[in-house]
Every structure is written in C-alpha cells, then in structure tokens.
Amino acid sequence: MHISDGIVSLEVAAVTAAASFLFCAYTLKQMPLHKSTQISIFSALFFIASFIHIPLGPTQVHLTLVEFIAIFLGKFSVLAIAIALLFQALLLGFGGLSSLGANIFIMGFASYATYLIFKFTFLKNLNAKLSYFLVGVTGVLISSFFLFIVLVLSSQNYLKVASLAMLANMPIAILEGFVTLFLFLYLEKAYPEIVKESRV
C-alpha cells in the first residue's frame, strides 16, 4: 500500500503530511517513557511484515499487521508505523519522502481506527477467535479504503487504479485475518496476561 513519490497531488501530500505530523507530535508528547520499547519492537515488526511485496496487476500487496500493532499500542501505533515507514523510504525506497504523510495516513491512521473499532463492546463480546480474525480483516479494509481516498482525491484519473488496488487487497485482508488470529492464539498460550490486558 506504499505510495511512491510523484503519485499524490501536492495538495493531498501537504494535507496528509500536516495531519500525520500533528498527530505524531501529539502522541509523542503524551507517550509514557516505558512505551518507547514497545513502539520500537512493533515498528520493527511492521518493517519486516510489509517488507515482502507481491506484484498483483497494476499494484503491489503485502502484509502490514497494522491491526495487531494497534491492539497493543492504541494511538501510539501511529508512531510505530510512522518510524518504520520513514526508514523504509530512506533505506529501501518503499514509498517516498514526499508521500510519507500520505502513507502514514493510509496505514498509521488505519491502525488507530482499527484499535477504536476493536474496543467496541460488540466486538469484545464476540468469540475471541472470531474477533481476532475480524480485527485482522478490518485493518486491511480500512487501509485499502484510505488508499482509495488518497488516490482519488489526488486525481480522478486514478479512480480505476484505486478501485483495482482495493480489490487486490481483499485476499490480503483474509490472509491478514488468519495471521492475526494465529498470532493472538500463540500469545494466549505463551503470554496470556498480555492478551488479557489487550481486551480490557
């Protein structure tokens, strides 16, 4: 879901960059010191998870685990994802610096939105396995929707590509749902207290 330099319009790049910077600054100001270690760990997780890109038609798809990160970090997940996106742009050429704000908006804000949805009572009252799967699917769906919005607002010429990108991410949403489910099932066995805290 990384958008490269030169894709988004100047206006969209400026607005998303401003929104991303302000939110990151806001969360950084509120961040407890003990959260810095967790943010570093989950930032590395995102960096690795989204490292492998699979070409699919006019776009590329990849895992993100934004929803898995969000459950443990809440609003601070945006910081973890922003750091990883910055290093991916600088070291690997994924995305770009001019589109960094847009990429943070697409994946970072989607992560926080997924966290808010996960905290809804109706999801918490569902069977745990089903809620883990749904939260994994939801993260990709929200990211895909944000990607669609950013592309279409940049140019109406991107409408077809944006629609195809959303469709291409549907299989990834299902896959990410299962990956998220298996990760939570593992943590339930290895570190049950962590999972219990995440569902509070």
Image (tube, rainbow, N blue to C red):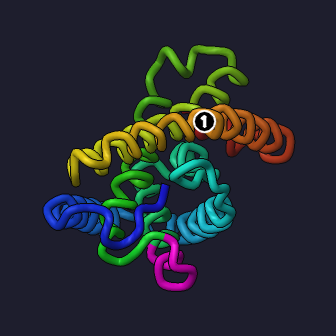
Residue for point 35% across, 42% down = 148
Q: Nearer the viewer, residue 90 or 186?
A: 90
In the image, what residue type sits under mark 1? Ala
Tell me if residue 116 comes above or below residue 150 in the rendering.
above
Q: Nearer the viewer, residue 74 or 176?
A: 176
Please say whether residue 181 is one of the residues in the magenta stretch: no
Please say whether residue 93 is one of the residues in the magenta stretch: yes
Q: Residue furthest left?
A: 11
Residue for point 60% across, 26% down = 134
Total label count? 1
Q: Is 193 left or right of 89, judged from the image as shown?
A: right
Quick one: label 1, few (<14), some, or many (20+) residues within 10 Å?
many
Residue for point 68% across, 20% down = 130
Residue for point 57% across, 71% down = 40
Q: Secondary structure at mark 1?
A: helix
Q: Residue furthest bottom?
A: 91
Residue 15 at x, y percent in the picture: 17, 60
State which region is magenta.
86-94
Residue 168, picture quadrant:
top right
Determine which residue is flagged by label 1.
173
- What secondary structure predominates along the stretch shown in magenta? helix
Whether residue 199 is visible, yes or no, is no
